Image (spheres, rainbow, N blue to C red):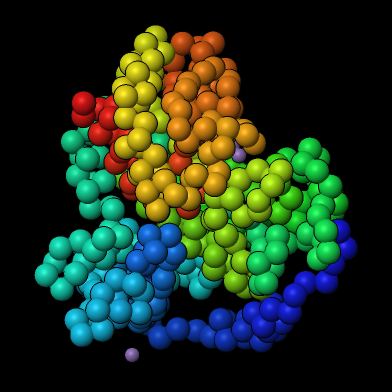
Amino acid sequence: MAQTLVESANAHINKNILEKFMELPMPDGVIQATYIWIDGTDENVRCKDRTLNYIPTSPNELPIWNYDGSSTYQADGSNSDVYLYPVRIYKDPFRRGNNILVLCETYRFDKTPTESNKRKECLETCNKCADEEPWFGIEQEYTLLDVDGRPLGWPRNGFPGPQGPYYCGVGANKVTARDIVEAHYRACLYAGVKICGTNAEVMPAQWEYQVGPCVGIEIGDDLWVSRFLLHRIAEEFGVVATLDPKPMEGDWNGAGAHTNVSTKTMREDNGIVEIQKAIKKLSQHHDRHIRAYDPRGGKDNERRLTGKHETSSIHDFSAGVANRGSSIRIPRGVSDDGKGYFEDRRPSSNCDPYSVVNAILNTICLE
Ligand code: ADP
Ligand code: MN
Ligand code: MN
Ligand code: MN
Ligand code: MN
């Protein structure tokens, strides 16, 4: 797999020169804030920066801002301003110090949520279910690509050896660019994202990290910021991180965002009964869930949920203990303990976690 990387301007910029400027002292009380939001693709993040003359301690101390929505597939040029409402503050692992990342919701000129603002409704649903104390953990799978779109480290003429040695692999012939994975893991911890683990995946150049368990809306916020950090760190290395659910056709695993779920009752003794009840309800709304589990209403998952490569068919609902070919998996340990959580394996890697959480809570808590 020895290959030279495709030239990426970003990777060739000398980062040591930047260090000289990042060490410059800042004027007293002045910080930099990066506002982050989801664009009109429902999949990609955007950001822009501003100076603040104070250190905010909560999002409502931050200014509402705006941007040109006609350049993000979110508004017409003639009425282009979209509002940014700060909703959560994270520490900035790039600039450090008191500098911050600010996750935002997006609103139209008339103060209604944009199409891509799925957070508002999700938060309302989470609030209705607060008594159940729902926890979520999401396994984010992704693939590293060269800037020309080829999986990183794959031979330019041909393919790597078949899947088998790569999952949780160690060694230069098994995994690619662990540097990015390490940098991202640390950056998430520093920022305040509840990242709980990481591993190399089945397809070479594919990786996973897990976020959680998070209470309610926090899973969506942390996952979106973890994705921002992933793209932003990969950018520095001159590498592209894609969340496409099936980056390579053929005998290669796709990428998902397995969503692990529990309520208070499920976590208590004999919670397995409640898990079974939830699965029964989920079985009655398979189509509605598939529509909510990727940004294109199921189109993206059609490529991934084939019934092969550790997936279930997009057309069928199934559940099983330790079964990675089913829609819902009850982990073996949960079955043994008679309590815990279940795993919904259907959400695609590029899903909006706000839509996923909203669908799950509507089905299991509000029906
Ligand atoms: P897998 O065996 O499917 O690869 P992982 O170890 O990658 O599982 O991920 C497990 C996920 O389950 C993590 O995101 C973790 O936060 C989450 N999780 C663990 N316990 C709970 C729970 N009680 N409720 C919800 N999520 C949980
Ligand atoms: Mn301008
Ligand atoms: Mn996993
Ligand atoms: Mn995985
Ligand atoms: Mn899983």
Q: Residue at x 55, y 50 (%)?
A: 245
The quadrant of the image that shows the N terminus is bottom right
Q: Which of the pair 191/256 is nearer the observer?
A: 256
Q: Is residue 303 left or right of residue 225?
A: right
Q: Judge from the rendering whether residue 243 lies leftward or rightward of residue 361; answer left or right.
A: right
Is residue 90 visible in this depiction of the protein? no
Depth order, front residue of 108/307 = 307
Q: Give how far across and how far down residue 255 sits, in percent.
A: 58, 46
**Residue 242: x %, y % from top left:** 57, 60
Q: Quadrant of the C terminus?
A: top left
Residue 105 pos. (x, y %): 27, 62
**Quarter holding residue 113:** bottom left
Q: Above or below — where is 111 with respect to 19?
A: above
Against 46, residue 59 (above or below) is above
Q: Is residue 12 visible?
A: yes
Q: Quadrant of residue 178?
A: bottom right
| Residue at 62% in and 34% down | 308
